[in-house]
Image (spheres, helix red, strand yellow):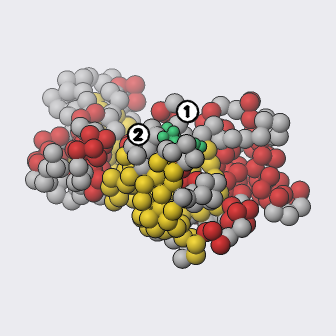
Amino acid sequence: MIEFDGVSKRYPDGTLAVDELSLTIEDGTITVFVGPSGCGKTTSLRMINRMVEPTSGRVLLDGKDIRESDPPVLRRGIGYVIQNAGLFPHRTVLDNVATVPVLSGWGKRKARARASELLEIVGLPSELAKRYPAQLSGGQRQRVGVARALAADAPVLLMDEPFSAVDPIVREGLQDELLRLQSQLGKTIVFVTHDIDEAVRLGDKVAVLRVGGRLAQYGTPAEVLRHPVDDFVASFVGRDRGYRGLSFVDSTGVEIRDVATVSLGDTVPAGDEWLLAINDAGQPRGWLSPGSTVDGALSESDLVAGGSLYRRGTAIRGALDAALSSPAGLGVVVDETGKAVGAVTARQVLDVIEKVPAPRQ
Ligand SMILES: Nc1ncnc2c1ncn2[C@@H]1O[C@H](COP(=O)(O)OP(=O)(O)OP(=O)(O)O)[C@@H](O)[C@H]1O
C-alpha cells in the first residue's frame, strides 16, 4: 500500500507543484493520476521513489515512511517506465532488459535468460532481442521499457506517460497488453497520463488533479464519469462522459433476441430478411443481405462483413457498439467461446440505458 499523507512539493523557484495531496493506493491495483499539463502528476509520481523529495507531508510504503529507506534500495523495489522508454541507445534490446538483474548481482547468462523471458511476456518476438533501440518502432520500444521495468521483479511499478508517444492504435494495443500483464502479475501500478480515456480504461482508481497540484477527485472510473464532483472534473472528463460511463452499466436488462442463421456451405433460398452466417463452430462470419441470391453453397464471398461482436454479460457499451455497427441493425451476441447466441437492437439497448440515472451535469 502506498499512502500520500498531506504531501506538498514547492520547487526552489516557488512553484507549488503538489498541494496537500492525501490518498491511499491499494496493493495490486492500477491507480491513474490524470489531469492537464502542469498539474503535478509527474512530481507526485516521483515522490514515491524519492526522485523528488516532498517539502512537507509523508509518503508511506507499506506503512513505512519512505524517508527511512535508502533511495537506491527503495528504487530496487519500484519499477519505473517513462515516455519513449528511456532505453540505453548503445545496448541491445536484450541487454537493456538485463541491466537491472545484472546490477542486482545476477550473472550475465542468468540475467539474459530472464530478459528473454520478459521480452516474450511483453509480446516481443525473440528476433528483436539483438537490435538496438533505434531499430525498433515506438510501440516496440515501449514494450522493451515495460520489460525492463518488470525485470526488477518489483511489487510496485511507476509509469509516467509510457504510451503517449505512440499512435492511437498502437497505444490501445499497449494498454490491452498492460491489462493482460496486470491480470497475471497483480502489481501495484501508479500510472500518469493526461488522457482521460486512457485513465478510465486502465485505472481501478483515478485521481484527477487540477493545476496548482490539488486533488480534485479520487474514485473509480465509473464514479468520476458518472458523478464528477465539480465543474472542473466535469469539463475534464468531457461532454461524452455519458457514453464513456456506459462502460460500467450492467447489461443484464438487455433482452437478447433470436437471430435467423444460415451455415456456410449450405444452399440458401432467397429471403427477405438479414441472415447471420455462421461457421461449423457456430461463430458469426458475416451477414447475408435480404434478397441476395446465392448460387450453390454459401461462402464467405457472398457475405456482408459484420460489425463488432458483443460478448454476453460484458458492459453495455459493447452491446450498443455491436448494434450500431451491424449492417443488419442487429448487434450479434456471442458467448465465451465466440458462438453466436442471439442479437440485440440499438433500441433495446437504449431502453435499458435510459433507465440509468443521468450523470450529474
Ligand atoms: N524542477 C522543477 N523546478 C521548478 N518547477 C518545476 C520543476 N519540475 C516541475 N515544475 C513545475 O511544477 C508543476 C508541476 O509539474 P509536473 O511535471 O509535476 O506536472 P505534470 O502534471 O506531470 O505535467 P505534464 O503533463 O506537462 O508533464 C509545473 O508547473 C512545472 O512547471
268 in relation to 150, above or below:
above
Q: Position of residue 220 (x, y in %)?
A: 34, 59
Q: Residue furthest bottom?
A: 63
* Badge number at residue 36: 2
Which residue is at 17% across, 41% downward? 345
Q: Is residue 332 left or right of residue 181?
A: left
Quadrant housing residue 221:
bottom left
Q: Mark 2 to mark 1: distance in Å?
A: 19 Å
Disc 2 secondary structure class = loop
Mark 2 residue's CB less than 8 Å from ligand 1: yes
Q: Position of residue 347 (x, y in %)?
A: 12, 41
For mark 1, what is the residue?
Answer: 166
Numbered label tally: 2
Which residue is at 65% across, 31% downward? 137
Q: Is residue 102 left or right of residue 338?
A: right
| Near-viewer residue (233 or 101) | 233
Q: Is residue 210 left or right of residue 245?
A: right
Q: Position of residue 196 (x, y in %)?
A: 38, 43
What amino acid type should be assigned to the residue bearing mark 1? Val
First-in-chain label (2 vs 1): 2
